[in-house]
């Protein structure tokens, strides 16, 4: 399969993830959509790594995976903290920081 | 095989966005991740595919399932707080996809039309990735390990249980100091007072 198919699929997945972030209001689902976008980036990295014939893109993909894991851990910690304080789990209602 | 995996990945992604219950969203994301692992295998990235299955679909998704079960899968309200959000968001997504496709396919890289570089059988195996990680990319490797450590500490600080709400971190530090100073007293404490949270001597 040509490389362009993978890259187009990756951009499609990225667009779906961005649409989900714009559309949904639950912070858990927004984190899931962030995962979608990061994975789309991973797919593009691995596809370009195959295109160039160099393994360094795969190393980048693994580093992206590490960063995604960190983001998930901190985000879920935040969600648990929000839930413990009996605040609503809705990003449109959590607007105390809004100027 | 590519179209099967691409269909699975796309279906999982759409499911994450469209399903109203967060628990089903997590399950759809697991389908998406497994399909992406198949795509990585097709791109001869065996180690990345294995890490995807083990780390993502294994560990991270278990974390998600636990948090969704703890928080409770709350249904979202159906009204729009921002008028027109339900129509503008897919429009923005479609515009982003078109823009990305123009940017990628319009770059006229000749290698796009090929199957990629002809690589040997050892391409993407753990030995090659590990050699690159420990030789050329040693500094990013160490930086990512420090990042993981910081994230773990930050998650504990954020989500850790505080016995006395309102006082916060000071109470934890104080109680741990007390317990380290007087371990015998702390040891006797549960027998004298039935409260399970009695770490600090009253």
Image (cartoon, coloured by chain):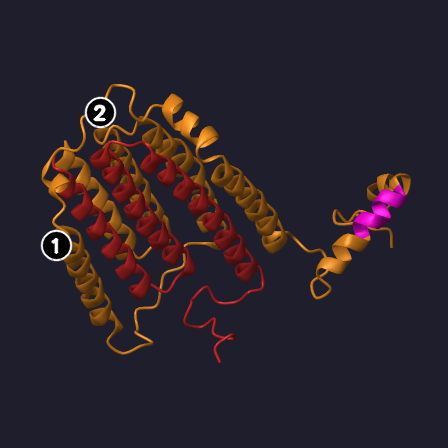
User: Taking B3 as reference, is A22 above or below it?
Assistant: below
Q: Is residue A94 left or right of residue B201?
A: left
Q: Residue A29 in the image: x percent, y percent?
A: 37, 56
Q: Are marks 2 and 1 in contact (CB under 8 Å)?
A: no
Query: Which residue is the extreme one toward the bottom?
Result: A99
Tell me the residue at 30%/73% (across/down): B79
Residue range highlighted in magenta: B175-182
Q: Quadrant of residue A64?
A: top left
Q: Which chain is red?
A: A
Q: Chief secondary structure of the magenta span? A: helix
Residue at mark 2 to residue at mark 1: CA–CA distance:
26 Å
Residue positioned 38% across, 35% down in the render? A59
Callout count: 2
User: Mark 2 vs mark 1: which is more N-terminal?
Assistant: 1
Vertical relation: B86 (above or below) A49: below
Instruction: In the rendered structure, find residue B106 and report the number of the disc placed on it.
Output: 1
At horizontal 28% and vertical 47% (from top left) the residue drawn is A40
Mark number for residue B119? 2
Chain ID, orange in image: B
Q: Position of residue B111 (x, y in %)?
A: 14, 39
Same subunit under labels 2 and 1? Answer: yes
Residue B189 place in picture, x, y as percent = 85, 44
């Amino acid at each position: 399969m040509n490389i362009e198919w993978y890259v187009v699929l990756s951009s499609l997945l990225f667009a779906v993830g961005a649409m989900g972030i714009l559309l949904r209001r639950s912070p858990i689902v927004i984190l899931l959509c962030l995962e979608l976008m990061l994975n789309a980036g991973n797919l593009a990295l691995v596809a370009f790594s195959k295109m160039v014939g160099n393994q360094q893109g795969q190393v980048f993909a693994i580093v992206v995976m590490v960063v995604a894991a960190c983001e998930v851990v901190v985000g879920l910690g935040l969600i648990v903290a929000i839930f413990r304080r009996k605040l609503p789990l809705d990003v449109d209602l959590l607007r105390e920081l809004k100027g | 095989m590519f179209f099967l995996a691409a269909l699975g990945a796309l279906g999982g992604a759409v499911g994450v966005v469209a399903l109203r219950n967060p628990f089903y969203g997590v399950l759809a994301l697991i389908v998406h991740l497994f399909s992406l692992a198949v795509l990585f295998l097709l791109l001869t990235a065996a180690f990345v595919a294995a890490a995807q299955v083990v780390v993502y679909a294994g560990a991270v998704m278990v974390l998600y399932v636990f948090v969704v079960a703890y928080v409770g899968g709350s249904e979202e309200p159906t009204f729009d707080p921002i008028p027109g959000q339900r129509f503008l968001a897919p429009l923005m997504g479609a515009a982003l996809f078109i823009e990305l496709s123009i940017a990628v396919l319009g770059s006229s890289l000749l290698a796009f039309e090929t199957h990629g570089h002809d690589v040997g059988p050892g391409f993407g195996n753990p030995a090659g990735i590990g050699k690159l990680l420990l030789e050329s990319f040693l500094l990013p490797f160490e930086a990512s390990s420090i990042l993981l450590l910081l994230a773990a500490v930050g998650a504990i600080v954020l989500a850790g249980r505080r016995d006395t709400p309102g006082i916060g971190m000071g109470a934890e530090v104080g109680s741990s100091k007390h317990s380290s100073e007087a371990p015998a007293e702390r040891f006797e404490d549960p027998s004298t007072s039935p409260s399970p949270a009695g770490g600090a001597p009253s």
